[in-house]
Amino acid sequence: MATWVNERCHKCRHSFTGGHTPIREVVGPPFLICPKCSSINNRESSCTEWLLMPPGRRAKHYATAALNVLVLSVSVGLLISIAWAYLGTGTLDFGTDDDAGLRFLLCWILGLPLSIWRVVHVHRRLVRASAERLRDEQYRSALVRLGYMRAA
Ligand SMILES: [Zn+2]
């Protein structure tokens, strides 16, 4: 699911991410100033501040979050149910375990609130950091100057 990215300066090819990273930032500054050549790199198409994000992109962001909850809860559920089966029987022979499906279902339901909490926590942290950046007067005026935001 992760797409490896290497964000580079369009002018001097300096890497902003220090090589390839598995995470693409979605909520963050829509532009990056190259520390090497000082040119302004537009990355609005892949990343912008939460307040500047159009509703369609927010919806896509929420859909991704929901998918993350699903993947995380299934993984957690599988892990717990495997541990449970192993501790209960001393083996990992699921062929003779009639309750494996039911056990997984129960573990998945147990893992669900944990996964929701985790994904919501990450989301809140991103939005909070975004709001924090926007409180910076200098950053706001840079956003206005570069045309990402209308002057308040
Ligand atoms: Zn550069």
Image (tube, helix red, strand yellow):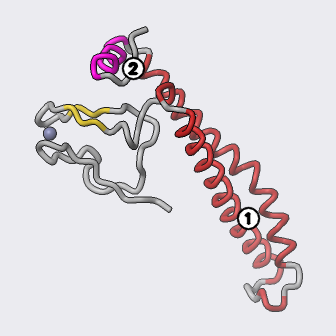
Q: Which badge, 2 or 1, comes first in the chain's sequence? A: 1
x, y percent for residue 112: 75, 53
x, y percent for residue 99: 88, 79
The residue depicted at 29 percent of the width and 53 percent of the height is: 6
Secondary structure predominantly adopted by residues drawn in magenta: helix
Q: Based on the picture, tell me whether residue 145 belongs to the magenta stretch.
A: yes
Amino acid bearing label 2: Met
CB within 8 Å, label 2 to label 1: no
Rendered image: mark on residue 77: 1
Name the foreground residue: 85 vs 132.
132
Q: 132 above or below 5?
A: above
Q: Quadrant of ligand 1?
A: top left
x, y percent for residue 121: 62, 38
Magenta range is: 137-146
Mark 2: few/some/many CA within 10 Å (<14, 14-19, 20+)? some
Amino acid bearing label 1: Gly
